[in-house]
Image: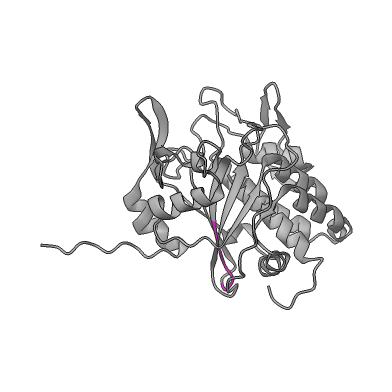
Amino acid sequence: ALLAITALLAGVVAVSRAVPTTSVTGDTVNPSVPGAVDHPPPVQRMVPPIPLQPEPDLNKPINILLLGADSRVTSDPGRADTIMLVRLDPVTKHVRLLSLPRDTRVTIPGHGVNKLNQASSGYYRDGGTSLLIDTITTDLLPGLRIDYTVKTDFAGFAAIIDALGGVTIDVEERMYYKAVDVLIDLRPGVQHLDGEQALGYARFRMDAVGDFGTWSGEDHGRVERQKKLVAAVIDQTKDVRTLLRLPAVIRAVQAVVTTDMSFNVMARIGMTYKDVAEKDVELVPFTGMPQYVDGVSYVIPNIDVLRKTTGPLFGVAAPSEPPSN
């Protein structure tokens, strides 16, 4: 689920080094096959460009909605496979991440109960990013402000890593998984990974537990690897040789990332977070439980925890307690 933030950080940091400026999963898994990942094929372009948003005060924390497209469904390229909230604090240089499972059971405004990612799809006439944002900010986290949206896909992530020249990672253990359209084959040790290899490293599962363990953040192995990858991407952008690759990086970002950020905002964010390290990235657990309702598999969110504990971490006022009798 951190693939989108990795691509974003790679893009904005690399772009910022080319522009002078005065200021700044829910992946699907086969639960019976350890190591299995759902690996969509490449696509050329996700969705039409998003209208630019007015620039917020970048001296204050901002929230970004990161979306990874479900590019396996070419007739519906807007459907989100990964939905993540990112909070950037320019004072502390802290990056806070919350992955919202795509199967989260929600009430979509004007449509009723469904899975969260259906709000972004063509399933509804008015489906898309706006309906997804409305669903998140009314049903899950009322009062949440989303300043920007960034969209990419898994092929886009790999393309940006390749444009950067790859990343150096210390692979913790043997990782092998083979399917019809997927091959992950990594051995332990420090090595330089290309885009596809980095994608495999980030998405590989050593067990059948899943992204969220018991859906309360207890399975840290996979997300910790992705957090490590974020730091590796940032380190790669600091390599002097990356400067020679800037034109290719910018072309990759333009081709595979769709956003309502202006170029100036991307550059300013990149300058602010150019030195972000693994210790600066916080993974906020999503609390909920998988459950079948009327034969449909959902993730049932713990709304009480989400609004009282998680929301304030993203600038949402905690709901007031009812007066005691």
| Residue in the foreground of this view, choosing between 296 and 310 | 296
What range of the chain is rendered magenta? 86-91
Residue 183 drawn above or below residue 121 = above
- In percent of the image, x 79 and y 42: which residue is there? 194
185 w.r.t. 160: above or below: above
Q: Residue at x 40, y 28 (%)?
A: 296
Q: From this viewpoint, is residue 228 visible?
A: no
16 to 84, vertically: above or below: below
Image location of residue 314, percent across then percent down: 47, 61
Does 206 appear in magenta?
no
Residue 196: name its quadrant: top right
The chief SS type of the magenta part is: strand
Q: Is residue 188 visible?
A: yes
For this orientation, the residue located farthest to the left is: 325
168 relative to 73, above or below = below
Q: How many marks?
A: 0
Q: Seen from this angle, which residue lies furthest bottom?
A: 22
Q: Quadrant of residue 300?
A: top left
Question: Quadrant of the image for the C terminus?
Answer: bottom left
Q: Residue at x 72, y 53 (%)?
A: 233
Which residue lies at the image location 38% right of the left edge and 24% below the top edge? 295
Q: Is residue 183 left or right of residue 58?
A: right
Q: Quadrant of the N terminus?
A: top right
Q: Position of residue 172 (x, y in %)?
A: 65, 40
Left or right, residue 110 beside residue 277: left
